[in-house]
């Protein structure tokens, strides 16, 4: 399973390019993923970067909804309308579309944040706040994960 881990600070250049962090490039190589789907998160001011296979698995859930329901229409628009295929160049750089740069309020510094199956691209201070808030909510709610194999 593809697992993007950690937070890596980088730069956004004047041409809208970022370098995919080396640990993330290694994950992509191991999984054979050559192409990503970049999309604006519909939950946070960041860009999501999905390996194509993981994005296709996620998007397959729409097929289980009623084809003409508001739920299916809204989720399809949220997932696909502003999504962009992307492939890193030989140096591991991605070009971010201007609409996505604006969505995430990126300037010159970026934070690539691993979230398991995909990674996110944030403005660094917003990423730090998001991480702090998530840890606090998890602690306050006593969130836990089931043990592997369903055993305590």
Image (spheres, rainbow, N blue to C red):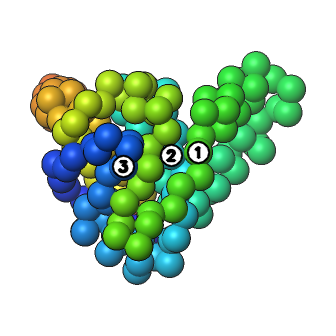
Q: Where is residue 99 in the image (x, y as percent from the top left)?
A: 50, 29
* Cα–Cα span, label 3 and label 1: 14 Å
Q: Residue 108 carries which label?
A: none
Q: For this view, does 82 lie left or right of residue 43? A: right
Is residue 80 something one can see in this rendering? yes
Sooner in the amino-acid sequence: mark 3 or mark 1: 3
Residue in view at x 21 percent, y 27 percent? 126
Asked if the residue under mark 1 is in contact with the one under mark 3, i.e. CB atoms within 8 Å, the reply is no
Asked if the residue under mark 2 is in contact with the one under mark 1, i.e. CB atoms within 8 Å, the reply is yes
Q: Where is residue 114 in the image (x, y as percent from the top left)?
A: 29, 53
Q: In this view, does 103 lie above or below 94?
A: above
- State the SS at label 2: strand
Residue in view at x 62 percent, y 56 percent? 57
* Cα–Cα span, label 1 and label 2: 5 Å
* Cα–Cα span, label 3 and label 2: 13 Å
* Other residues around mark 2 within 10 Å, as few (<14) / some (14–19) / many (≥20): many
For the residue pair 137 and 92, the one nearer the viewer reads as 92
Q: Residue 84 carries which label?
A: 1
Mark 2, residue position: 38
Mark 3, residue position: 17
Sooner in the amino-acid sequence: mark 1 or mark 2: 2
Q: Where is residue 123 in the image (x, y as percent from the top left)?
A: 24, 32
Which quarter of the figure has residue 54?
A: bottom right
């Amino acid at each position: 399973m593809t697992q993007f881990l950690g937070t890596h600070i980088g730069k956004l250049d004047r041409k809208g390019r970022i370098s995919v962090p080396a640990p993330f490039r290694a994950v992509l190589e191991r999984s054979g993923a050559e192409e990503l789907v970049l999309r604006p998160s519909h939950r946070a001011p960041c860009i999501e970067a999905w390996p194509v296979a993981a994005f296709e698995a996620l998007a397959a859930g729409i097929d289980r909804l009623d084809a003409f329901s508001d739920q299916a229409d809204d989720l399809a628009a949220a997932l696909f309308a502003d999504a962009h295929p992307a492939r890193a160049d030989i140096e591991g750089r991605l070009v971010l579309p201007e609409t996505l740069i604006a969505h995430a309020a990126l300037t010159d510094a970026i934070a690539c944040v691993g979230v398991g199956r995909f990674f996110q691209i944030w403005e660094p201070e917003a990423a730090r706040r998001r991480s702090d808030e998530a840890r606090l909510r998890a602690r306050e709610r006593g969130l836990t994960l089931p043990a592997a194999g369903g055993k305590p």
